[in-house]
Image (spheres, rainbow, N blue to C red):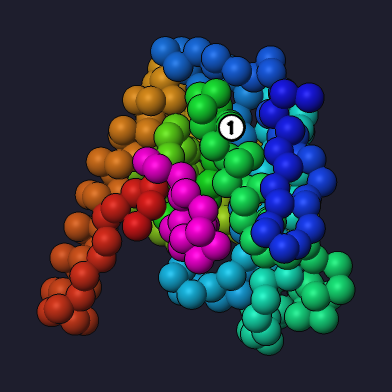
Amino acid sequence: MPGDVRVCVVGGACSTPVSVVRPKLRNVNTTTSIWTQPIAVFDLETTGIDVTTSRIVSAHVGILDARGEVIRNHDWLADPGVEIPEQATAVHGITTERARAEGQPAALVVAEIISALRELLTANVPVVIYNAPYDLSLLHHEALRYGYTPLENPSPIVDPLVIDKAVDRFRKGKRTLEASAEFYGVSLLDAHDAASDAIAAGHVAQALIRAHADKLEGLSAAELHAKQVEWCAEQAASFQEYMRRSKNPNFVASGEWPVR
């Protein structure tokens, strides 16, 4: 089937074929609003918060239609090759023992995720990632770790965290996925499960357009991606100014998006 991905590691096993994108999703119209077309969703659960050293434990890539229904999905469980810290297990529930017993080799998982995302982005399918710099930067370093070509300038990406801060700048309270899902009336049944988080992020993105149609509805995927680059830089500059004024005169906040 077109879109199938099979990855082999020298001296090791081959993965089973993975197909996330059907041929019908190719050549998505990039000049019309993304909100009337399918969107992809992506999330990682990992061993930690440092994107340069943490490893992937589980992942989800899926596709939602304009109504938010799941029409395509794939899940991965990886053996990261290192111990999963207790703090990480407390978040996502995956132990080192389970990952070793049930997970695929990390190199295979990383390659399949990259291939799935690259195919989606090549087809101009917007990929929704909540706090995209974390997931995409970690995936970038995982690619380098295993000798793969990372995603170069991935686009179009949709980051509900950046968008929400831009269109509702002065709302008080947390902006975590759980908080945003609750605010926008989105169901999140199993927080910190890769599939649940990815799908909830997609639903939050779709809820944003309903709540802020005056600011978002007419934007194409390319236009929204460019806006988020600007918004993230502005948000980082504002946060840096606040931190330097109130807490640490040397504080630096990165405004790079979607990869740092």
Q: Residue at x 21, y 81 (%)?
A: 247
**Residue 99 picture location, percent across and down:** 78, 72
Name the side, left or right, on which 208 lies relative to 60: left
For residue 141, above or below residue 211? below
Mark 1 neighbour class, 10 Å CA radius: few under 14, some 14 to 19, many 20 or more: many
Q: Quadrant of the N terminus?
A: top right
In this rendered view, identify the residue nearer to me: 52 or 149: 149
Q: What segment is highlighted magenta in the picture? A: 136-153
- In reply to whether residue 147 is colored magenta, the answer given is yes
Q: Quadrant of the C terminus?
A: bottom left
Mark 1 lies on a secondary structure that is: helix
| Residue 104 in view (yes/no) | yes
Q: Residue at x 62, y 65 (%)?
A: 56
Name the side, left or right, on which 242 lies relative to 59: left
Please tell me how many numbered marks the rendered image carries. 1
In this rendered view, identify the residue nearer to me: 214 or 80: 80
- In reply to whether residue 162 is colored magenta, the answer given is no
For the view shown, which residue lies furthest in the right direction? 101
Residue for badge 1: 119
Question: Which quadrant of the view contains residue 243?
Answer: bottom left
In the image, what residue type sits under mark 1?
Glu
Q: Residue at x 68, y 57 (%)?
A: 9
Question: Which quadrant of the view contains residue 98?
Answer: bottom right
| Residue 182 in view (yes/no) | no
For residue 5, above or below residue 246? above
**Residue 84 picture location, percent across and down:** 67, 81
In this rendered view, identify the residue nearer to me: 240 or 70: 70
Name the side, left or right, on which 191 lies relative to 243: right
For residue 18, above or below residue 59? above
